[in-house]
Each structure stands twice: as structure tokens, then as C-alpha cells.
Image: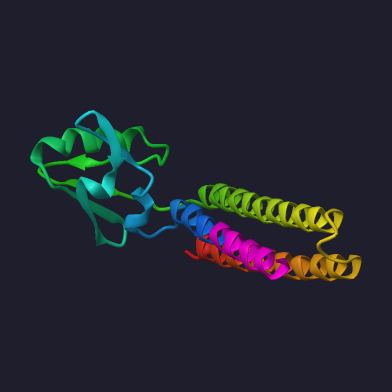
């Protein structure tokens, strides 16, 4: 029982780390990378779909993304979706779409660091919430007399160690992202 709760908490915390990586992918560095456009949704036959389902996104050079729609009539919809996203990008449209990325200034880099820190803090909060939920489940098992108080205390310590490990991993990934952002 307790081992199942530990495994479940580790899996949930691992998913939180994956979510953090997705959040970090949206925080752009000075280089062009297709994942910058992952959050862009494009209207397609009455429903919004991710950009990568209606176009190929590639890197033309270190500061330019190129978006090649699968259908020619999607060019204007994709252009509009990129402009309206909160990424601050201005695509150049021909038969394909070029998305130039401006060089990051010191101030922009600092703002991106704040966004990265916010993503990391959200991940830490999620990890702590998972810990709280699991500890609540363990207390419920103790209340139902399915485990002893010693088992409950040991399980609580184990869950705390798991939590500390994942929080340290979040800090490590945040430090790497901040270093990447500040590299010119």
C-alpha cells in the first residue's frame, strides 16, 4: 500500500517535471527553436488545432523559423495565429511563413528569467501539493488502522525525501535555463 503511494507520487512528480520542461520550451532564448511555436493554436475547419498539425515548423537559421503549411489556404490563418499569440513575433508571409526572432536585450533576458522562475515555482508548488495529497492518504490509512504509527512516520520521511529530490531537480533545471537565457 505505502509502496504504491510512493510510486504514484514519484510518477506524478515526474509528470510535473515534464510539464516544467514544456513550460521552459516556451521561454525563448536567443536561438530559433521549433518548440517556441508549440503553444500556438490555429483555427482549422471550425476547431483550434496545434500549429504542428497544420504545418511543418523548421529552423532556417539561428534567428529564423520557417513554417510551411500543409495547405496553401492556411497561410493567412497561421500568420494571424502567430501574430495573436503572446510570443511577440511578427511573421513574414510569402508562400511559406518566416518568423524572425529579434536578438534578446539584457532587459528582455531578465524578463525571460522571471518567466522561467515563475514556471519553476509553479512546478515546486505542484510537487508540494502531491506530497500533501500522499501524506493525507497515509494518514487515512493510519486512521483506518491499516498501518502502524511507525509505518506512517517512515512513509512520511520517505515521501519528504522524494519531494526534496524533485524540488532539487526543479532548481537544477531552472539554473540551467537561466544560464542558457543569459548566454549571449
Residue situated in front as seen by the camera: 182 or 173: 173
In the image, residue 149 above or below residue 122: below
Q: In the rendering, at what x and y percent does residue 127 appear?
A: 67, 56
Specify whether 34 is left or right of 142: left
Residue situated in front as seen by the camera: 112 or 10: 10
- Which image quadrant: the N terminus? bottom right
- The stretch drawn in magenta includes residue 3: yes
Q: Residue furthest right?
A: 149
Q: Residue furthest front?
A: 145
Main SS of residues in magenta: helix
Specify whether 181 is left or right of 39: right
In the image, residue 66 above or below residue 2: above
Residue numbers of the magenta segment: 1-16
Q: In the rendering, at what x and y percent does residue 172 appear?
A: 63, 68
In the image, residue 165 above or below residue 35: below
- The stretch drawn in magenta includes residue 140: no
Residue situated in front as seen by the camera: 71 or 88: 71
Residue at the (86%, 53%) spot, across then down: 143
Q: In the rendering, at what x and y percent does residue 55 appear?
A: 20, 48
Residue situated in front as seen by the camera: 107 or 51: 51
Residue 102 in view here:
no
Residue at the (51%, 65%) spot, across then down: 180
Residue at the (32%, 35%) spot, across then down: 83
Amino acid at each position: 500500500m505505502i509502496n504504491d503511494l510512493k510510486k504514484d507520487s514519484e510518477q506524478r512528480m515526474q509528470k510535473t517535471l515534464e510539464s516544467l520542461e514544456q513550460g521552459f520550451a516556451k521561454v525563448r532564448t536567443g536561438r530559433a527553436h521549433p518548440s517556441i511555436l508549440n503553444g500556438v493554436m490555429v483555427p482549422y475547419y471550425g476547431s483550434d488545432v496545434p500549429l504542428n498539425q497544420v504545418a511543418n515548423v523548421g529552423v532556417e537559421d539561428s534567428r529564423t523559423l520557417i513554417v510551411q503549411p500543409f495547405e496553401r489556404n492556411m497561410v493567412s490563418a497561421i500568420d494571424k495565429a502567430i501574430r495573436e499569440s503572446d510570443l511577440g513575433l511578427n511573421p513574414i508571409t510569402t508562400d511559406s511563413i518566416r518568423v524572425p526572432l529579434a536578438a534578446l536585450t539584457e532587459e528582455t533576458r531578465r524578463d525571460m528569467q522571471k518567466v522561467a522562475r515563475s514556471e519553476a515555482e509553479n512546478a515546486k508548488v505542484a510537487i508540494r501539493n502531491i506530497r500533501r495529497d500522499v501524506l493525507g492518504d497515509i494518514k487515512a490509512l493510519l486512521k483506518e488502522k491499516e498501518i502502524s504509527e511507525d509505518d506512517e512516520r517512515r512513509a512520511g520521511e520517505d515521501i519528504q525525501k522524494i519531494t526534496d529530490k524533485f524540488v532539487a531537480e526543479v532548481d537544477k533545471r531552472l539554473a540551467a535555463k537561466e544560464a542558457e537565457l543569459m548566454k549571449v
